[in-house]
Structure formats: structure tokens, C-alpha cells
Image (cartoon, rainbow, N blue to C red):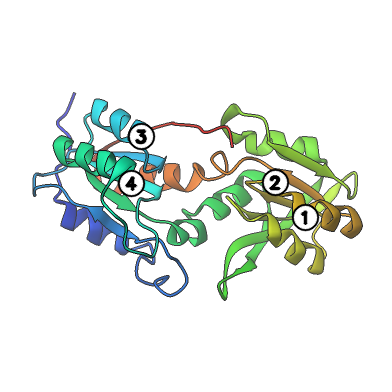
Amino acid sequence: MPVSAEFTTAKLDAFFRSFLEIEGFTKDDNSLNGIQVDNDGAPVRKIAFGVDASLETFQQAAAAGAGMLFVHHGMFWGASARIAGNLRHRIKFLLDSNICLYAAHLPLDQHPKFGNNAVLAQLLGLENIEPFGGYSGRKIGYKGTFPKPVTIEEAVKKINFMGRPPTGIFPFGKKENTSAAVMSGGGASNVRDAIEEGVDLFVTGESAHQVYHDCLEGKINMIAGGHYSTEVWGLRAVMQHCVGELGINAEFVDVPTGL
């Protein structure tokens, strides 16, 4: 087996910034995007990709021999945090394992090619794709039309959600859908945008009690695929891009929450 290419964390950071808006969401995203915990300067031969900055994810990344872990949900969110309890244990594990932690939250959701929402739109087979859904003044979701009408059941099969069933389905609209909008993760409230824009089907991550009657009264179909299951797609797309462009070894670390 050929030896993996080697890169410093600084060079990998520059590579990610070449196509992800790491600084572009500073005012809109409370995630500390970019390098959150650096390594000691050792070259990285393998990158692991995972949804959450959890101890279990770190352990699997270490077992895979990764020198960097790229996550969607990092450890630092807008405010100073005491380095105690679970946070201390996580940071200590990263330092002991010499793993660099890299986070990309909204920059990954929004990306028009490698983002969670763009990939979900592609999986659905949408055409005429355009930005959708307000979030802190920016549109990070996507919407489009189906080349031919599809049912909710057919839409679920198109996405597959990593082989896991959706966490909720709100079948309050048309039997066959001609258009859809996607907003991964905790985007349930954006169903109101979908209703306002006349979309037939809305796909998100988490279901939410407060939008049940919005869906019912707005006569729209909604699929809640699960926060985790709708946010693996951008990571996998970036991972494939890294392998193709850099020739570095990479592995997806699957730690589902069922939510």
C-alpha cells in the first residue's frame, strides 16, 4: 500500500479555506470554524471525518490512525468555556493522541457543491436548484424541482439517510411532489419559508412539535431525516474532494446518535 501524502495542519487549513467560507460566516455562525485544537506540528498522513466532536468520535479517529479530525459540530460555540469535565477529557484525548480538530459548521451547510444541503438536493435529483431558507440573514439551504413528480416514500429512498429510517414524516401535502427544499440539521422552522415559497416537500434533520400545525395548515409534506443523518453528506463530499485533490488517506467515522 502506498504511503499517504503528508501535510501540515497549516497547509490543510489553507486548502479547506480555498473552497469553504471559513471566515465568511464569522458574524452569522457562533461555531469557531477552522482549527480548534492544533497538533504539535507533526505532518498529517490521514484525515478522519465525523459529525460531532465527541470523545467516541475522537477515539475512533485515533484508532484509524488519523492526525486530523474534520467535524461539522466542533467543541467551541461563541463563548469562553471552562476547560473542565467532558470538555477537559476531550481536549486531553486530542492532545495525548496528537490529533488536530478542525470544524466547519455553516460553511459546510451552505457550500453549493460540497455542503450538506447541496448534496441532499443532488440525492433527491432536484433540478433548477437555487438558494433557500433564511438563517441569520443568509440562505444556506437549497430548493429545486423534480424532473417528474415523486411521493414522500420515493424521496426517502432517494436520500436513504445512511440506511437509517427518518425520525419523522409529516404527510400533509400532495401525494406527488413536484418541488422540494432542503435544510439539514435543526432547520424545522424553515418549513415556514417552504410554505411561503409554495414548495411541495420540505426535507430537514430534526422534527419539531412547534411546526406540526404549520405543516398541517400549510398543506406541505415534511421529512425529518434526523439531525445526524442529514449532516453526514457534506463531510463525505469534502472527504472525497481531499482524497482526489491531495492524495491523502481519509476515513469517515460513523458515530450515529439516532436523533
Labels 3 and 2 touching (C-beta < 8 A): no
Name which residue type carries label 4: Phe
Kindly identify which residue carries mark 2.
Answer: 207
* Residue in view at x 64 percent, y 46 percent: 206
Q: Position of residue 140 (x, y in %)?
A: 56, 64
Question: Are circles 3 and 4 on residues that touch, CB within 8 Å?
Answer: no
Using the numbered discs, state the Cα–Cα distance from disc 1 to disc 3 in whole angstroms.
32 Å
Q: Are marks 4 and 2 in contact (CB under 8 Å)?
A: no
The quadrant holding residue 18 is bottom left
Q: Are marks 4 and 1 in contact (CB under 8 Å)?
A: no
Residue 217 sits above or below residue 56 on the image: below
Amino acid at the residue labelled 2: Ser
Instruction: Quickly name the residue at label 1.
Output: 211
CA gap between label 4 and label 2 equals 26 Å
Q: Secondary structure at mark 1?
A: helix
> What element does badge 3 sit on?
helix
Position of residue 8 relative to residue 129, above or below, is above
Q: Which residue is mark 3?
A: 57
Residue wearing tag 4: 70
Residue at (76%, 64%) from the top-left corner?
A: 192
First-in-chain label (1 vs 3) = 3
Q: Position of residue 52 (x, y in %)?
A: 41, 42
Q: Residue at x 21, y 40 (%)?
A: 94
Q: In the picture, residue 162 is in which quadrant? A: top right
Residue in the image at 78% along x and 35% along y: 153
The mark that comes first in sequence, 3 or 2, is 3
Q: Is residue 154 above or below residue 163?
A: below
